[in-house]
Image: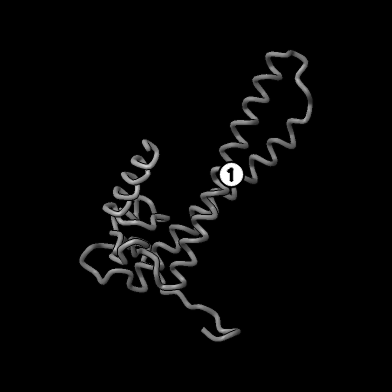
Amino acid sequence: MKNGEAMTYPLLPPDYKPTEKEEFMNPQMREYFRQKLLNWRAELLKESSETLHHLQEETVPEADVTDRASTETDRFTELRTRDRERKLIAKIDSALRRIDDGVYGYCEDTGEPIGIKRLDARPIATLSIEAQERHERMERTQRED
């Protein structure tokens, strides 16, 4: 793509679902996953914004020690959840870059297609199921050493 050129994306029929019968990562399939990732990202950002708004509203300290402890625990849990979501957004952004680079949907270890069912369930996946299982076995072995 040259400077100043806008990327064009194919229109998706409203009922489109990728299948194993079509060419893997054809333009329509890539757009399906791009939209899925963008929608997921927007949802996470909306929840994050709501959390910030909620935390800003709760500035009045609780008089009761137990209530204060409960409020602090709730805040900590919310912030920990938001941190996990922040990391998830980074993975979503990485997946979107892989779509733009033309490598989305292919295993980082083997270069083989990850599989539509796996990508539909976990659109940020970078490894095929087999490679993921190998990776997890290696991690367990290294932890046991």
- Closest to the observer: 108 or 7? 108
88 vs 110, left or right, is: right
Which residue is rendered at x = 33% and y = 69% of the image? Answer: 25
Residue 110: percent from the left, percent from the top? 30, 63
12 vs 5, left or right, is: left
**Kind of residue at badge 1:** Glu
Which residue is rendered at x = 70% and y = 35% of the image? Answer: 55
Q: Residue furthest bottom?
A: 2
Q: Quadrant of residue 141?
A: top left
- Closest to the observer: 115 or 26? 115
Q: Secondary structure at mark 1?
A: helix
Q: Residue furthest left?
A: 21
Question: Looking at the rendering, in which quadrant would you find the C terminus?
Answer: top left
Q: Quadrant of residue 101?
A: bottom left
84 vs 54, left or right, is: left
Q: Residue furthest front?
A: 145
Q: Quadrant of residue 102?
A: bottom left
- Closest to the observer: 106 or 78? 106
Query: Which residue is the site of mark 1?
Result: 47
Residue 22: percent from the left, percent from the top? 24, 69
Which residue is rendered at x = 38% and y = 42% of the image? Answer: 142
Residue 86: percent from the left, percent from the top? 57, 48
Residue 39: percent from the left, percent from the top? 49, 56
